[in-house]
Image: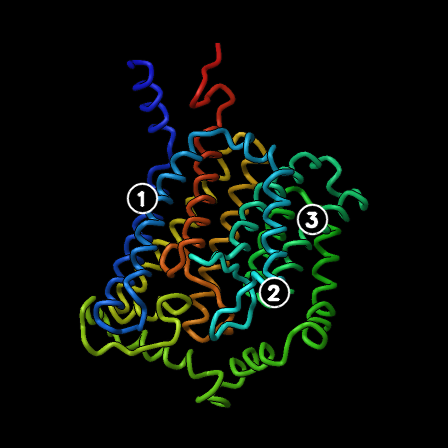
């Protein structure tokens, strides 16, 4: 019993507690916001939403702590199991099980009858682990053309799959994870320069042959605001109005004069947060999210090896891209692209996915010493 207590005490000391506290604080605020929306009628969501969010938060903390206690190398070695499963789940969205939610442009959900799940969330986790394993094992050959081609194919698979779903927002998240992890693994400067040079023609081809007309229009209204105020700009205009209506300190959680915005419980929850907590509250949330990102970056500097570093950087890229695109979407500097705000937006699958990724970061931080393992000791 005494040995077990010592192990728990040692594990607790090696845990990045402040990171876990920060993300859980955000998740709890998210539950409170959803409860407020439901009880005040600011949104037409049912109590089911905040109950799912609350249960997912509790499960997320438990999953996070369990993963943190296990050496991350054990997870990466099992890539041949979870990576194919994640890909197959995404492919199932192209079958009769696939679901396109009302008002959405993408067919990115699986209808399981009793609930729905978004397989791309599982694919994000599988990609972070499998790509970290691939890059770390092939670090010495990363700049060899054939090896680099295989690495690019590895990154292109998730980007291509979710783009085919019509989920361009998630495709951008995967692309950012791929770029940051690849560059951090020691990619040669000559390839970085080449990537910069081919970016303009790639954007040209994407604009003319890749993007659908609707997505082009969403970008164009940002460049020329006011051209479609009752159409494509309507949701963002409402979001800005809602965000500004909170004033300096907000209306509180149970006011009766909220501005209603479509998808306010999900993609536009930052607009509701601004109404409830005002400018001060919105800035405070941005600071907390920035702290989470910086904390993950700092943990990446204290890992045992390249693999741990890349897992942390992949998680950073995922969370940062989500935050940047979601808040930018509400502020009308980014197009409406269906990206939730990490730890705040409604969605059990997304919340558990984020907590699992944080668990991997905590594992990398805790197991930064070759002689430390939670479940066994070295002689």
Residue 295: x %, y % from top left: 41, 44
Tell whether 148 sits left or right of 358. right
SS state under label 2: helix
CA separation, marks 1 and 3? 34 Å
> Which residue is at the far right?
146
Foreground of the two, 211 or 189 = 211
Q: Are marks 1 and 2 in contact (CB under 8 Å)?
A: no
Q: Viewer-nearest of labels 1 and 2? A: 2
SS state under label 1: helix
> Which residue is at the far top?
379
Q: What residue sits right under mark 1 in the picture?
A: 21
> Which residue is at the far front?
113
Residue at image position (67%, 75%) is 207
Question: Which label is found at residue 198?
Answer: none
Q: What residue sits right under mark 3 in the picture?
A: 154
Residue 358, above or below 120: above
Foreground of the two, 296 or 57 = 57
Number of other residues with Cα within 10 Å of mark 3, as a class: few under 14, some 14 to 19, many 20 or more: some
Q: Viewer-nearest of labels 3 and 2? A: 2
Residue 21, above or below 336: above
Res 230 quadrant in image = bottom left
Q: Earlier in the sequence, mark 3 or mark 2?
A: 3
SS state under label 3: helix
Residue 261: x %, y % from top left: 35, 76
Residue at image position (34%, 28%) is 13
Foreground of the two, 315 or 95 = 95
Q: What residue sits right under mark 2 in the picture?
A: 165
Residue 66: x %, y % from top left: 41, 34
Residue 270: x %, y % from top left: 35, 66
């Amino acid at each position: 019993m005494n040995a077990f207590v010592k192990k728990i005490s040692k594990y607790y000391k090696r845990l990045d507690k402040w990171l876990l506290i920060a993300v859980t604080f955000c998740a709890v605020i998210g539950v409170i916001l959803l409860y407020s929306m439901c009880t005040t009628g600011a949104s037409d969501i049912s109590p089911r939403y905040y109950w799912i969010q609350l249960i997912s938060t509790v499960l997320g903390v438990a999953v996070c702590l369990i993963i943190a206690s296990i050496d991350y190398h054990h997870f990466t070695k099992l890539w041949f199991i979870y990576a194919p499963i994640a890909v197959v789940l995404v492919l199932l969205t192209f079958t009769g099980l696939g679901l396109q939610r009302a008002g959405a442009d993408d067919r990115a959900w699986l209808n399981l009858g009793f609930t729905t799940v978004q397989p791309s969330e599982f694919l994000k986790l599988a990609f972070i682990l499998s790509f970290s394993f691939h890059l770390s094992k092939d670090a010495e050959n990363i700049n060899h053309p054939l090896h680099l081609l295989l690495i690019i194919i590895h990154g292109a698979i998730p980007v291509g799959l979710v783009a085919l779903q019509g989920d361009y927002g998630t495709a951008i998240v995967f692309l950012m994870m791929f770029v940051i992890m690849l560059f951090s693994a020691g990619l040669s400067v000559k390839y970085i320069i080449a990537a910069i040079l081919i970016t303009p023609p790639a954007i040209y081809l994407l604009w003319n042959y890749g993007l659908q007309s609707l997505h082009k229009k969403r970008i164009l209204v940002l460049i020329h605001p006011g051209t479609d105020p009752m159409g494509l700009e309507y949701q963002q205009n409402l979001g800005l109005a809602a965000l500004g209506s909170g004033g300096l300190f907000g209306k509180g959680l149970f006011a009766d004069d909220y501005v209603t915005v479509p998808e306010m419980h999900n993609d536009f929850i930052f607009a509701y947060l601004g109404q409830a907590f005002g400018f001060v509250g919105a800035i405070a949330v941005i600071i907390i999210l920035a702290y989470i990102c910086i904390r993950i970056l700092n943990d990446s500097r204290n890992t045992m090896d390249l693999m741990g570093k890349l897992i942390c950087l992949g998680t950073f890229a995922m969370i940062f891209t989500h935050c940047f695109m979601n808040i930018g979407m509400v502020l009308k500097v980014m197009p409406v692209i269906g990206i939730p705000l990490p730890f705040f937006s409604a969605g059990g699958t997304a919340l558990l996915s984020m907590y699992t990724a944080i668990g991997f970061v905590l594992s990398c931080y805790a197991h930064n010493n070759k002689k430390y393992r939670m479940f066994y000791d070295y002689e």
